[in-house]
């Protein structure tokens, strides 16, 4: 039930400008062609460059030239022929009084841009040179002397937080480390800047990862898919913005999501969890925690739940009375002796097979289209109110009769392994498929 991937914006920063452009471009091209590993919704280099330009212009509009310069550099790293990025970066440098750096940018541009853009770059470079010459012109005696007090003080560009080294200490898993280098370290400098960490989605499923240490640096994540790996632990305590987390098909024995209060969807099925506390995840709409070793599950605080799949655990009880919005409930293969669904009137799919139920009341679940309750100990099953049923599987119980006179949409029926002697399906869909014991009289 994975969602469509979303785009990830990555911004880079470099300390020295003139030498790094060609090197970074090569790194970007190599990283972009590395097969098998990809960030969600990968886009073309031209598209990435356009996004960085758009971001840079937004920073300029906000007079945030420090971040604008970083974004312009990122655009150039992606597309070294982008004349607009060079020209606008030079203008940003001019705004902060770095005229020499502006000149260097345009000199580099002349070596890289296409022929049709050279004249534009030359015009901009001449204007900057003229500005530099005007500043160097001595002041005449007739003009008032310029003192240091009369020159506006420029606030120096602040240094960003210390960049994160992409090394074994910060990212112990070699495969994960290579993923970071190839997909998030856009400038290829071996470090992650603040802006490079501001991605919203990371997908590293099915990569044989054994350790996801380092994920804590990506505090802006809203989606993380690390399913189908070999993880034995997972710390998402600093990824507090997560709305989607899939860590299914791993070897987790503990999963702490108490800090992930924005979670809407949690896939942690097929692990080794013995406990799962979702009491603080009050925004959950979907919870998939099947195939674990849970002996209890409290979903009383998860009033927004629509889909709950807690099958193949060791649950002896399950209270869904506070989950009035449930549409899908799969609690099969547990040890349930009772199941109260009177409050779940919107339920459309119920699978409670392979439990120890002796009774099952679905009279208020009038929206049900699928009911699987086989392999229990039911002696009676009333489906007269479930007129929308299309699938009913009640095999391997202790039923002696089954009234299907109101189930006019029923087209699949499995009822073998009971104590039935006759079965009237004449009111059901013509041609209904019936699986019953040999000797049961089928009336069509």
Image (cartoon, helix red, strand yellow):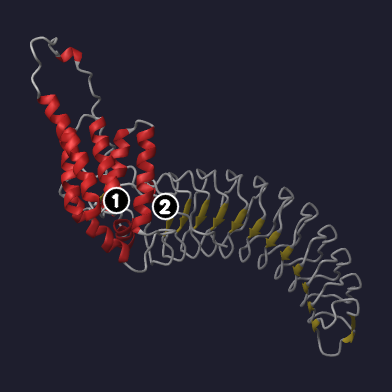
Q: Could you tell me which secondary element the residue under label 1 belongs to?
A: loop
Gap between marks 1 and 2, in whole Å? 22 Å
Q: State the image coordinates of residue 257 (x, y, percent, origin top left).
A: 51, 48
Front residue (pair 74, 266) = 74
Tell whether 8 sits left or right of 96. Answer: right
| Outermost residue to the bottom | 439
Residue 70 lies in quadrant = top left
Measured from the top left, where is residue 40 in percent x and y? 43, 58
Q: Is residue 196 above or below residue 337?
A: above
User: Which numbered dot is residue 170?
Assistant: 1
Q: Quadrant of the C terminus?
A: bottom right
Q: In this view, does 441 lie above or below 80?
A: below
Residue at 25% from the left image edge and 25% from the top image edge:
155
Q: Which of marks 1 and 2 is nearer the N terminus?
A: 2
**Label for residue 8?**
2
Q: Where is residue 5 in the image (x, y as percent from the top left)?
A: 49, 58
Label 2: which secondary element: loop
Residue 192 visible? The answer is no
Query: Closest to the observer: 384 or 47?
Result: 47
Which numbered disc, 1 or 2, marks the residue closer to the eye?
Answer: 2
Q: Is the C-beta separation of discs 1 and 2 under 8 Å?
A: no
Q: Residues within 10 Å of mark 2 (few under 14, many from 20)?
A: some
Percent coordinates x, y for residue 238 in the rendering: 43, 44
């Amino acid at each position: 039930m994975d969602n469509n991937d979303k785009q990830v914006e990555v911004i880079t920063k470099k300390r020295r400008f003139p030498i790094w452009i060609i090197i970074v471009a090569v790194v970007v091209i190599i990283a972009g062609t590395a097969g098998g590993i990809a960030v969600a919704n990968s886009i073309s280099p031209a598209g990435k460059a356009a996004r960085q330009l758009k971001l840079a212009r937004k920073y300029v509009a906000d007079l945030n030239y420090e971040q604008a310069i970083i974004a312009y550099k990122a655009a150039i790293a992606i597309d070294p022929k982008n004349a607009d990025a060079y020209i606008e970066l030079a203008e940003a440098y001019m705004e902060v009084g770095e005229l020499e750096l502006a000149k260097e940018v345009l000199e580099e541009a002349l070596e890289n841009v296409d022929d049709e853009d050279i004249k534009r770059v030359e015009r901009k470079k001449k204007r900057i040179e003229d500005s530099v010459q005007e500043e160097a012109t001595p002041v005449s005696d007739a003009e008032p002397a310029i003192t240091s007090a009369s020159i506006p003080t420029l606030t120096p560009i602040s240094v960003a937080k210390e960049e994160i080294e992409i090394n074994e200490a910060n990212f112990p898993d070699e495969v994960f480390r290579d993923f970071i280098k190839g997909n998030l370290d856009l400038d290829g400098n071996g470090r992650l800047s603040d802006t490079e960490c501001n991605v919203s989605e990371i997908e590293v499923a099915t990569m044989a990862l054994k350790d996801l240490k380092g994920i804590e640096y990506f505090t802006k994540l809203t989606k993380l898919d690390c399913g189908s790996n070999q993880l034995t632990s997972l710390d998402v305590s600093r990824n507090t913005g997560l709305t989607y987390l899939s860590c299914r098909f791993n070897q987790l024995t503990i999963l702490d999501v108490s800090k992930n209060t924005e979670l809407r969807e949690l896939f942690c099925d097929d692990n080794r969890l013995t406990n799962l506390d979702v009491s603080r995840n009050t925004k959950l709409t979907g919870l998939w925690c099947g195939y674990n070793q849970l002996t209890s599950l409290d979903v009383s605080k998860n009033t927004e739940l629509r889909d709950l799949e807690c099958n193949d655990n060791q649950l002896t009880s399950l209270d869904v009375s506070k989950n009035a919005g449930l549409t899908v409930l799969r609690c099969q293969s547990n040890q349930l002796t009772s199941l109260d669904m009177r409050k779940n009137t919107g339920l459309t799919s119920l699978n409670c097979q392979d439990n120890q139920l002796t009774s099952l009341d679905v009279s208020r679940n009038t929206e049900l289209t699928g009911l699987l309750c086989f392999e229990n100990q039911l002696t009676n099953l009333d489906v007269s109110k479930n007129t929308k049923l299309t699938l009913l599987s009640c095999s391997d119980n202790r039923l002696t009769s089954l009234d299907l006179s109101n189930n006019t949409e029923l087209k699949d029926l499995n009822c073998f392994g009971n104590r039935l002697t006759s079965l009237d399906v004449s009111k059901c869909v013509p041609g209904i498929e019936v699986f019953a014991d040999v000797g049961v009289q089928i009336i069509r």
